[in-house]
Amino acid sequence: MTTNNETAEQSGLLGRVLDKIERVGNKLPDPAMLFLMLMFAVWVISAFLSSVSFDAIDPRTDSPIVVNNLLSATALTQFLTDMVKTFTMFAPLGVVLVAMLGVGIAEHSGFINTALKQMLKVTPAKLLTPAVVVVGIISHTATDAGYVVVIPLAGVIFFTVGRHPLAGIAAAFAGVSGGFCANFIPSGIDPLLQSFTQSAAQIVDPDIQVNPLNNWFFAASSCIPITLVIWYLTDKVLEPRLNKSHKVNKDDVDLPAMEEATPQEMKAFKVASLVMLAAVVGFFSLTVPETSTLRDANGSLTSFSAPLMQSIVPLIFIFFMLPGIVYGYMTGAFKTSADVVQAMSKSMAGMSHYIVMAFFCAQFVAAFSASNLGALIAVEGAGGLKALNLSAEVTVVGMIFLVGFVNLFVGSSSAKWALIGPVLVPMLMQLNISPDLSQAAYRIGDSSSNIITPLMPYFPLVVVYCQRYVKNIGIGTLISMMLPFSLALLSIWTAWLLVYWSIGLPLGLGASYTYG
C-alpha cells in the first residue's frame, strides 16, 4: 500500500521531470522559427539521403523509396513558385479563420458568455472535467470542429468557475486529439481507415471485405477509459501543478465578467438560441432525402467526401454568427453592422500570431512531404517490426508503439495507414490476426501521441489558446502539460484492447479477431 510520503515523493519526481521538459522545451525558438529551422533541416537531410539507395518499398508506388533532394535547383524553384499557394492551401488555416469569424461574433456579442452561465448552472462542478472530455471526443464527428470550438471554450469555462484555464484546455485537447480515434458516434474516420485496411488485406486475400464500422464497438467502449484517465490526470496531477507554477493574471485576461444574466440578456439568449436551433434543424432537414445534394455518391452523410462533412466549418460560422447577431442587437452590444464587423476583426486580431506560425508550419509540412522522409520512417519502422518475428500479442503492442512514434512525424491518419498498413496488415494476417484487430490497434497509436508533437498542425493553435491566460507559455509548457496524458493513453488504451481481445467482445460490425 502506498503511503502519503511515497505518493508525494512520486508526485515530486513527476513534477521535476515535467518541469525539466518544460524548461528545455521553452528554450526552443518561437514555434514559427522552429518550423523554419525544421524546414531547413529537412532540406539538408534530403540532400544527403537523396544519393542513398533504400530497399524499403513504397506501397503507394510498389517501387523502392527515393528521398527527393530539396536543395536541387528544380526543387528550390518549385518551392518559391508554390510558397503562396502552400500557405493559402494549408487546411488548418482556413478551418481556424473561417470558424473563428463566426465564433468571434458570438463571443463579443455576449452570447457565448450567457450560454456558459446557463451551462454551468446545470453541470455539477465535480463533473465539469469529464463533461469537457466527452464533448471533445464527440466533436470528432464534426471533423476539426473541436480544435476551434471545444478547446478554447474549455479554457473559458474553467476560468469562469475559478479553476485553472490551462487545465480546461489540456482536458479538451486530450479529448479532441488524444482520443481522436474513439467516439460513440460513427464518423468519417471509420470509412477512411477501412478503405486502406481493405486494400492492404486484399494483398493476401483479394476477396476479403472489411466493414466500414468494423471498429465501432471498440471505439465507443474506448471512450470510458479515455474519459476516466483524462479526468484523473487533469484534476489530480495537472491542475495542482499549474496552480503552483503558472499563475493566471486575471487582470490581463480579456473575458467578460460572469455576473448573473439580466432579464434582457436572458430574453435575448432565448430568442438567439431558438434562431440557432431553427437554423440547425432547417439545415439538417435538407439531409433527410436520399437524393440530398449533401450526400456523397454512395448516399453517405459521414464520409469525408460527403458535402455535409466538407461544410462543417462554414456551418460553424453560420450557426455561431446568427445567434450572435440576434443576441447582440437585442442586448445593445451591436448597434450597427460596423459593430458586427468589429467583433470579427477582434477575433482575427487574436489569431495574428497563429497566422504567422501557420505560414512557416505550412512550408515545413510541404517540404517534409515532398522529401519522402516521412514515408521512409514509416515503412522502415514497419519493416523492422516485421523482422523481429514476435508473438501475436507482442506484435500488436509493438505496432501500437511504432504507430505512436511515427505519428510524431507523420500526422495525417490516412497517410500513415497508407504507408504502414500494406506491411503490417498482411504480416498480422499471417499470424491469424484479422485486419479488423490490426486497424483497432492502429487507432490507438494514431491518437495517443497527437498531443505531444509540435508538428501536428493544430499544436501551435493550442499554444495560442494557452497564451491568452499565461503570457510566457511556449511549446515546452504545452508538451510538459500533455506528456502524462499521452503516456497514460498509450499504455491504458493498449491494455484496454488486450483485455477487450482476451474477453472476445465484438470489435464492430462484421468484425473478427482472427483471420483464416
Image (cartoon, rainbow, N blue to C red):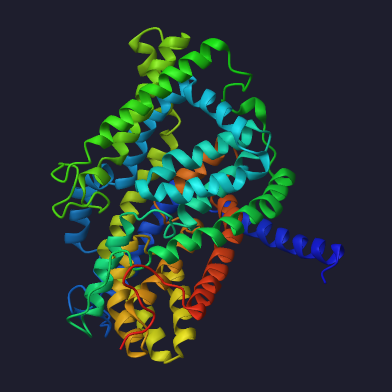
Residue at the image point whose x is 61% and y is 60% from the top = 484
Asked if residue 57 lies left or right of residue 8, the reply is: left
Instruction: Tell me: residue 137, above or below residue 61.
Output: above
Q: Quadrant of residue 378?
A: bottom left
Give percent across and percent down for residue 333.
46, 12
Asked if residue 489 lies left or right of residue 335, the reply is: right
Q: Quadrant of residue 189?
A: bottom left
Marks counted in the figure total 0
Asked whether residue 492 appears in the rendered view, the answer is yes
Asked if residue 44 lies left or right of residue 253, the reply is: left
Asked whether residue 372 appears in the rendered view, the answer is no
Residue at the image point whose x is 28% and y is 67% from the top = 194
Give percent across and percent down for residue 187.
34, 54
Quadrant that contains the C terminus = bottom left
Give percent across and percent down for residue 103.
41, 29
Give percent across and percent down for residue 298.
15, 55
Quadrant that contains the N terminus = bottom right
Asked if residue 357 lies left or right of residue 170, the reply is: left
Depth check: 474 or 5 in front? 5
Residue at the image point whose x is 34% and y is 66% from the top = 44
Depth check: 118 or 363 in front? 118
